[in-house]
Image (cartoon, helix red, strand yellow):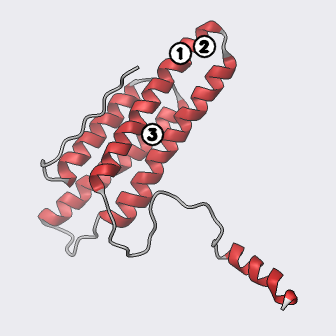
Amino acid sequence: MKKLVFPIIVLLFSLGVFQKSYAHCEIPCGIYNDELRIALLYEHILTIEKSMDKITELSTSGDYMGVTRWTMAKEDHANKIQHEVAQYFITQRIKLPTETEGAEFEKYEKQLALLHQLIVYAMKAKQTADKTYIEKLRKSLSDFEEVYFEGKHRHKIEHHD
């Protein structure tokens, strides 16, 4: 029995059983909260914006440890946007259309284009403290929300110090 323990552990690691768990699984559980995901994406954008402000502020004061911490936070939240968009919306929530033309396909194309923008603008936000990417992220997310929910839901996350 003891001779089997090590190979079983190695097998479990190789299958990813002990890997870090993320926001949502890819099993067909049917448990989704799209509104929550959108709200979280807005919150990540707000955190990136605050991080950019703090990086700019602390850079002039010479607080390089603070700059490093806010840079890491900015990159972490940009990564979370990319992960949420790819693993939740693209992989699980955007349905493949049955036809390659028509209204269903047009909606599919719009959703994919807007989600791609979110991934790219999140990457750009990691590379710079240029807040124009914050506005691009917000616009892309707002436009996606409009298409995804067909104009029914609107989120607004505000920053309060």
Q: Looking at the rendered structure, which numbered label has been put on residue 108?
A: none
Measured as percent of width and height from the top left, residue 87 is found at: 44, 60
Q: Which residue is mark 3?
A: 122
What is the spatial separation of the Cα atoms under label 1 and label 3, in whole angstroms? 18 Å
Residue at image point 18% right, 53% down: 149
Measured as percent of width and height from the top left, residue 88 is found at: 39, 59
Tell us which disc is closer to us: 1 or 3. 1
Asked if the residue at tag 2 contacts the one at tag 1, i.e. Cβ–Cβ closer than 8 Å, the answer is yes
What is the spatial separation of the Cα atoms under label 3 and label 2, in whole angstroms? 22 Å
105 over 110 or under it: above or below: below
Per the image, label 3 sits on a secondary structure element best described as helix
Q: Closest to the observer: 46 or 86?
A: 46
Q: Which quarter of the rendering shows the N terminus?
A: bottom right
Q: Residue 30 appears in which quarter of the rendering?
A: bottom left
Q: Closest to the observer: 101 or 15?
A: 15
Mark 3 Cα shell of 10 Å, populated few (<14), some (14-19), many (≥20)? many
Q: Which residue is mark 1?
A: 56
44 over 54 or under it: above or below: below
N-terminal-most mark, 3 or 2: 2
Per the image, label 1 sits on a secondary structure element best described as helix
Q: Looking at the rendered structure, which numbered label has been put on residue 59?
A: 2
